[in-house]
Amino acid sequence: MSQGYAVTAEFYDLLQAVEHRRLTGRLLDRWLGAPEVGVLDVGAGTGLDVMVLARRCPVVVHAVEPAAAMRAVLLSRLAEHPDPAARIRVHARPVQELGLRGVADFGWCLNTMAGLPAADRAAALAALADALVPGGRLVVQRPPTEAADSRRDLPSWPVGGDLYSGEVTTERVGPRAVRWRFDYRVSRDGALVRTAAEAFDGHLATAAEFDAELAAAGFTADATDDPDIVVARRC
Ligand SMILES: C[S@@+](CC[C@H](N)C(=O)[O-])C[C@H]1O[C@@H](n2cnc3c(N)ncnc32)[C@H](O)[C@@H]1O
C-alpha cells in the first residue's frame, strides 16, 4: 500500500477537490450532526475533509490514511494550519488494522470501500464498528453495483500558465471487478509537457450485499444519499 497513489497524489487536489468539496459540503450539512466523542475520516486521502471536519467539530478527528503519498499531502495541509491540526490525529495504516475502540460517534468514509475486496471490506467495517461508540453514525460510500466500460474527463486546472488535466477510463475486468485508469496531462500553449498514469482495482457489490456486510459488522443502515451513500448506526 505504501506505493499506492504515488502518481495520483500530485494531481488529486488540482483535478478533484472542487467536485469533492461540493459533494462533501452537502453531505456534511445533512448528516454530520454534532459529534461529542470524536470523528473518524477513513481513507482520508490528501486531507480534503479532515480540516473541514475539525473546524466543524470540537473533538479529535482521526484521519486514517495508509498511502504515504496521500498522507504527505495531508500532513503538509496540517502543517499550514496548526489550529485545528492540533486536534487531528493521523493513523498511518489501513482501517482493517486501526485497532481503536469507542473513540468516535461519527465516521466518514468516502470513495474508499470500492477499492477493497469483500474480505477486506468486512474487516474494515468491523474495525469501524469497534472504533465507534454504540449509537454512533457512519456515513459511508458503498462500492458501485455496476460499472460499464467508459471514459470521462476530470476538471482541468491552470497552474502558472500550464494546464493540468486528466481522464478516467473504467474497464470491466471480471464479473465483480473493475479497473480505473487515471491519465494525467500537463500542457503549455496547447503542447504536451508531460503525462503520468495510475490504475486502481475496484470491487463491485450490490446495495443488498453491502447492507448485509454492515449488519454483520454491527450496523443498522438507516438511510441512503447520493452517490451510493449509506448512513448507518452502530448498534
Ligand atoms: C480515492 S481516495 C479518496 C480520498 C478521500 N476520501 C476523498 O474522497 O477525497 C481513497 C483513499 O483511501 C485510502 N485507502 C485505501 N485502502 C485503504 C484502507 N484499507 N484503509 C484506509 N484507507 C484506505 C487510499 O490510500 C486513498 O487515499
Image (cartoon, rainbow, N blue to C red):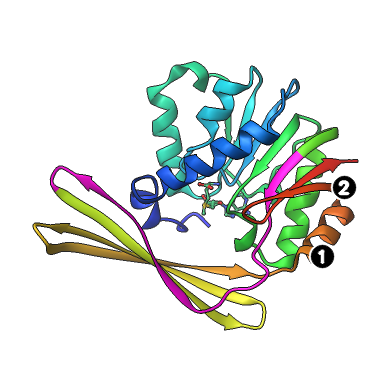
What are the residue bounds of the magenta stretch? Answer: 138-161
Q: Position of residue 137 (x, y in %)?
A: 78, 37
Q: Secondary structure at mark 2?
A: strand
Q: Is residue 170 above or below residue 67?
A: below
Q: Can you tell which mark lies on residue 208?
A: 1
Give the answer, above or below, for where 186 lies relative to 127. Answer: below
- N-terminal of the pair, mark 2 or mark 1, is 1
Q: Which residue is mark 2?
A: 220
In this view, the residue in front, 145 or 40, is 145
Give percent across and percent down for residue 13.
Answer: 38, 45
Q: Are marks 2 and 1 in contact (CB under 8 Å)?
A: no
The amino acid type, in three-letter code, at marker 2 is Thr
91 within the magenta span: no
* Count of all numbered marks drawn on residues in the image: 2
> Is residue 167 found left or right of 170 in the rendered image?
left
Which residue corresponds to the image point at 79% horizontal and 47% vertical from the top-left?
223
Quadrant location of the C terminus in the rendered image: top right
Q: Residue type at mark 1? A: Ala
Question: x%, y% of residue 140?
Answer: 69, 48
Q: Sort mark 1 into few (<14), some (14-19) or many (20+) by Cα contacts within 10 Å.
A: few
Splitting the image into 4 quarters, where does residue 41 fall?
Answer: top right
Q: Residue furthest right?
A: 235
